[in-house]
Every structure is written in structure tokens, then in C-alpha cells.
Amino acid sequence: MKILVSNDDGYLAPGIIALVDALRPIAEIVVVAPDSNRSGSSNSLTLDRPLSVYRAENGFYFVNGTPSDCVHVALTGGLAFKPDLIVSGINQGQNMGDDTLYSGTVAAATEGFLFGIPAIAFSQVEKGWAHVDDAARVAREFVERHFELLPKPYLLNVNIPNLPYERIRGTRPTRLGKRHESEPVIKTQDPHGREIFWIGPAGRAKDAGEGTDFHAVAGGYVSVTPLQIDLTHNAQLDMLKMGLS
């Protein structure tokens, strides 16, 4: 198996290093990841300047762009082969509910999916990298056992509790939960006295009932949510057809 690995925390992040170390025994690995943290970059592509690709001492390739840039460049000109699988992560912090719309981790996987390649985004629920090697073991076993799980291509969003491997209770298929609105921006001043704004924290979980990703990880389970790209609101489309006819 040939796997392209990317992330949004940057090529030096502990999560991607642990993930690659875990996957190397089962696959040929190529890493193309951002040169620095690009969290929250969503599916953005860099169109206003050229991109550069460099190779680090550990063999990882890194790009001065977004996670989507990394996968796009790799698939359209950087690789001499088409990967069997795209794996993104392991992200520092959860990507659940509405987070998936903003996540660079999910975006890297989505870019591969748009090219017709199965893709999986892996995240740890809490920040700080606690038990990241255990999470990488979970990721490897998931790839080993479930690569053929669904018709290809597929796009899966996987969130792993920060627990020792032995305390993870299993895997649950889930739907995305929903958060409350984000907290307000944080206003402050730069050294010159000009007003600046920091984006506030994400909202708390609003829909975290049974069957959601929030509910699964709270119970010590790995959450696996299949994602799709079609954003069409079909019910409203039918209403428009009737109203505009």
C-alpha cells in the first residue's frame, strides 16, 4: 500500500511523526505537509503566489502553503504515483461537529477525496499530545482493518480520545454533532496602540446526544464519521422548484 500523509499542524508536529512511525511497517509512506501550523485553514488553496516544496532531514516534504495545497501539489505534480490512501493528522485537538468546516486536517483528507482517493482524517480529542503514540496505534489498526470497509472513494473523520490504548473502549460509527455559536472575539491592542482581534474559542457542544461524535468520545470510544461534499439543501431545492416554476 502507498499512503500520502499530511496534516495542518506542520511537518514537525508530534502527531504526524507518531502517525508516520506507526504506518511505516504496513505501507510505503510519503509525507507532504505544511511548513508551519495552518490550523483553521479549511479547504483554502493558495492562488496569489507560487508555492515551494522542500525536503527535511527526516525525508518529509514540506510546503509553504495550506494542507489543501500540500495534497494538491503532491497529487498533481509532486508524486510519481497515485496513492492508495490519503491520511491526515494526527491533529492536536478534536475535529467534531461544526469543526469539520474549518479544519485543515479534514481539508487535507478532503482534497484527496476530490481526486477520487480514499481519505481519513485523524484527530486527538484534547490538545497537548497526551498518549499520541496510542492514538497512532489506533490509526494504524484502523487502516489495517478497515481500508476496504466502504466503497471507494470515501472520506472519514476519526476522533480518538487521549487515553492509553488499553482504556479505549472501541470504535463507534457516528454522525456530526453541533456546537453553540462561537465565543466573541477577544479585543486587545498591538504595541502601537491599534485595536486588534483574536478569534474566540469554539462554542460548547449543543447536540452531543447518543449517536454523535461528541457522545462517542465522551464515553471513551473512537468516533468515525463518514463525510460527503454535496452541500445541496435538497428540501429547499424542491421548494425553489415549486416557487420559481
Image (cartoon, rainbow, N blue to C red):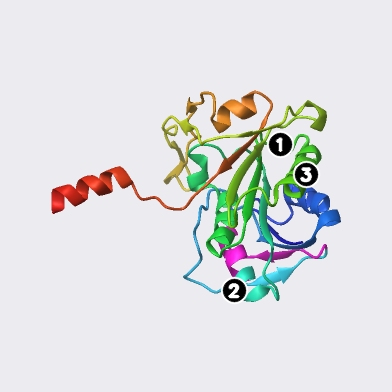
Image position of 158 (left or right of 208): right
Q: In this orientation, which residue lies closer to the viewer: 236 or 111? A: 236
In the rendered structure, the answer to whether residue 72 lies left or right of residue 242 reads right
Observer able to see residue 129: yes
Number of numbered discs overlaid on the protein picture = 3
Q: Does dot 2 land on a helix, a strand or a loop?
A: helix
Residue 204 percent across, percent down from the top left: 49, 27
| Contact, mark 1 vs mark 3 (Cβ under 8 Å) | no
Residue 141 is marked as: 3
Say which amino acid is labelled 3.
Glu
Q: CA distance from mark 1 to mark 3?
A: 22 Å
Report crowding for label 3: few under 14, some 14 to 19, many 20 or more residues within 10 A (C-alpha). Answer: some
Across and down, in percent, residue 123 comes to 65, 42
Q: Residue furthest right?
A: 25
Q: Which residue is mark 2?
A: 76
In the figure, 173 relative to 12: above or below?
above
* Nearer-N-terminus badge (1/2): 2
Question: Label 1, on which residue?
Answer: 128
Q: Residue at x 14, y 52 (%)?
A: 244
Check disc 1 and report its element: helix, strand or loop: loop
